[in-house]
Amino acid sequence: APTTLYEGAVYLCESELYSVEKLDYPNRRAYVKKTHGDYYTDAIDYTDVSILEGFERESAEGTVYEHGEVRVVTRVVGYKKIKFYTLENLGYGKIELPDLQFHTTSYWMTFRKALVDRLPYLRLEVIDGVLGLGYALHSMAVLHLMCDPRDLNRCVGDRGAKWFIRLSRGSKGIYSSFDSREEIPEEKLELFEPTLFLYDNYPGGIGFSHQLFDDTRTLLDKVLRLISRCECRSGCPSCVGPAKEVGEKSKEVALVLLKEILE
């Protein structure tokens, strides 16, 4: 709800548009009125994940795979007005809502410094590759588990919960996981070991993370075939995601990462 109902939002219900005039957050009520505008709203949010407890762990050269309990924190900070059909950006608005926090279970993989350092790519290019890998892994995990795509969510950040990646249309950056949420230059990261989290999108978890952990090799083999057989040049919605969102080198780096960890 925080990403769809907020003051200024355009809410779609049964093919009708409603403008949110007032949000009574403590009582969980939104006051709306019907509108006939030519735009919709898209929330801008940050999500970071911190590890609370690891249940099982498996190490390979350059990579660590785990599953366990995590805390997910989502902060909605603003919204964009997007025109129908043309997708033109018509402006921005500010949102002030409490952070949404919950504990759940997650599967995650960490790319160790030794692996990252031997790759012929800049740190931001490595992040592009991890984002693309996350996109493809999420798609494959949904098919593997036979669940709804919304049952799982993903995040790229630091296993020590010091930074996370914010990704939205046309922008990408490394941000502090602390209250300031300040953007951090890539060269100022003391330890760069990107971690890809794939977590159950429900408080308490629903049991997916353990199965993903057990089937890691099978899933990664399928993801490698998915990406390598896609005929696009640098990324598309069928493999690592649109290149304009995840980066021009996302597909290339994702393939290199997969080949490194599957050797």
Image: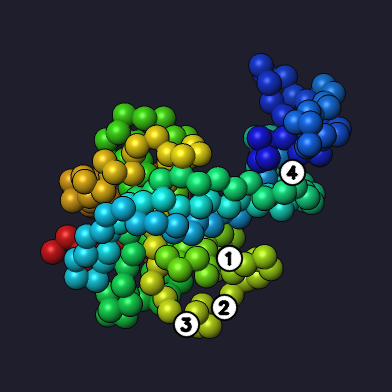
The residue that mark 1 highlights is: 177
The residue that mark 4 highlights is: 81
Q: Circle 4 — which element?
A: strand
Label 3, label 1: how far apart the Cα atoms are = 14 Å
The residue that mark 2 highlights is: 185
11 left or right of 146? right
User: Local crowd at mark 2 within 10 Å, few (<14), some, or many (≥20)?
Assistant: few
Residue type at mark 2 is Pro
Q: Is residue 161 above or below residue 93?
A: below
210 left or right of 215? right
Q: Are marks 4 and 2 in contact (CB under 8 Å)?
A: no
Label 4, label 2: how far apart the Cα atoms are = 28 Å
Residue 63 x %, y %: 26, 66
Label 4, label 3: how far apart the Cα atoms are = 37 Å
| Mark earlier in primary sequence (3, 1) | 1
Residue type at mark 1 is Ser
Front position among marks 4 and 3 = 3
Q: Residue furthest top?
A: 14
Residue 94 x %, y %: 79, 51
The residue that mark 3 highlights is: 190
Residue 177 x %, y %: 58, 65
